[in-house]
Image: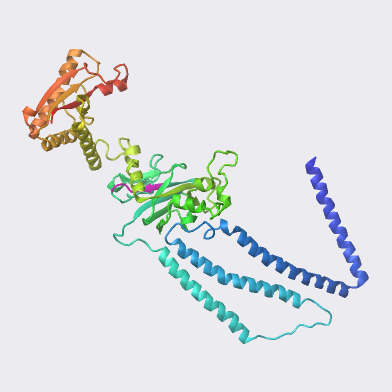
Amino acid sequence: MTGLIAVLCIVLIGLVIVQIGKVTELATKIRGEEDAQEETNEWNAKFSMAFLVFFLIGCVVSAVYYAPSMLGYGPHLPASEHGAGLDYLFNLTLFFTGIVFVITHIYLFWFSYKYRGRKNRKALYFVHDTKLEIIWTAIPAIVMTFLVVGGLDAWNEVMADVGENEDHIEIEATGVQFFWTMRYPGPDGALGTKYFKNITPTNSLGMDFNDEKCLDDVVSSGAGEVIKLPIGKKVRVRITSRDVLHNFDIPHFRVKMDAVPGLPTHFVFTPSLTTEQYRENLGVLNKDGSPKYPEWHELSDPTDPDSKKRYEDFYYELACAELCGKGHYSMRRIIDVVSVEEWEEWMAGQNSFYMSTIRGTDEDPHKGKLLDVEIKQRKRDFNTTVQKALAATELADKIIRLDYVNFETGSARLTDLSKYELNNLFDFMNKNPNVTVEVSGHTDSTGDPDSNLTLSDSRAKAVYDFLLNKGASADRMTAVGYGITQPIGDNATEEGRKENRRTEFKILTQ
């Protein structure tokens, strides 16, 4: 019913307009065509001047009103070192084009007013005015020269790549419908190679794990995961796309670059304000205690009175500035700029994509091998554990489990990879000549208890023999098999039985 009424109203309005047109046409015939046209010209000329005034006032008022919401004005200062240069260039361009904008519109509407149609007025015709042509060609050319030179200077500064051996962080952003996948270098500080033919459901970036630089790379692709960046550190972003055209856009950093399939691009910038510093700028107060920017003191969730204020909930944002599909909006990722120390601590807690997802699977080209990075990490972990044991006062805290010492099923034959853990134990004994240890073997409850006791004793003796052959003194070691007598897990479950099948050493003296 409502739709029918709306249609009837539209039809009625159309009929009214048609009738007004007929009445106007009739009045024109009565008054005469020339008089009616002159009257129309007068009204149009006056209306155009009124429109000019309201138009220019509206431009100024709207610019002042929306300035606090625009980048580069109000609280929205640039948060990167190069941002101030781009803002200056933008303001300089706006200044000159604004002058031209105002002058041309004044002349445009004044021309329509001054030269409105009147009786007995004739147009003046002249071929050309050389002086006028020189003026309107030379002045814009000079202004444009300065703007273009300034723009090229800014472009060369902003788009300059990092120098050889220059201290920087290189990360990678890959656009996919509809999310960004970020890749950070691991402790080696370098991103590994990737190849599109390596892409699988698990390895979405196509990383080549035969390249050692890939093994410690950290990958973040979750929409809720925060992108961390350190303040004051130059960041080089590799920008790629796996499907369609995307755009890597971080407005507060004045960073914007297309992500083109098959054509890697990059952008270099240095964050100059931490997230917390930017929040403080948004929430600053006047001398009388009132908010300088009231809109940022509103609740971030108006329906929740306990929610944070908008400035307290602020984060930098990475967005896609291309219309890449229906899910375009979901490519939003938040960025947190922190101190270098906090960033390093955060990075230290990240697991590499290879170790967390690929290691030991059918996609692992190093399956069954121990990598240098694993050997070094295990050694660091072992040294940390034994130092804690040396400092402990309770005897139970001086028992250390050899997690990476394993035997072939049902035998006391050490696996090849066990030697790395036993080498760590040997090095520990060499560095601490006063230490004596007891090597102990344990089994689960599966099978005959006497056989398990014999097996555990043989396994402890195998570790003892390995250390002895390496050069450890026999009077500093003992080997004991405990069989099933000292379980630490529930033998009724597979997980518990796995816990019970273990090799340990105990620090007896130090």
Name the one closer to the observer, 438 or 211: 438
Q: Residue at x 45, y 55 (%)?
A: 260
Above/below status of 380 relative to 163: above
State the scheme by which the image is colored. rainbow
Q: Quadrant of the C terminus?
A: top left
Tell me if 325 is positioned left or right of 208 in this view.
right
Q: Magenta residues, as a range? A: 182-187
Tell me if 173 is positioned left or right of 475 in this view.
right
Q: Quadrant of the N terminus?
A: top right
Q: Residue at x 27, y 37 (%)?
A: 367
Tell me if 313 is positioned left or right of 361 in this view.
right
Q: Residue at x 90, y 62 (%)?
A: 23
Residue 363 visible in image: no
Above/below status of 356 relative to 165: above
Horizontal and vertical percent position of residue 506: 17, 26
Which image quarter: residue 141? Answer: bottom right
Name the one closer to the observer, 475 or 450: 475
Q: Name, please, the residue furthest toward the front.
A: 288
Q: Residue at x 60, y 58 (%)?
A: 66
Q: Name, please, the residue furthest toward the right.
A: 30
Above/below status of 345 relative to 450: below
Name the one closer to the observer, 34 or 507: 507
Which image quarter: residue 292? Answer: bottom right
Horizontal and vertical percent position of residue 362: 32, 36
Residue 2 visible in image: yes
Horizontal and vertical percent position of residue 468: 8, 30
Residue 202 belongs to the span the image colors magenta = no
> How many labels were placed on the picture?
0
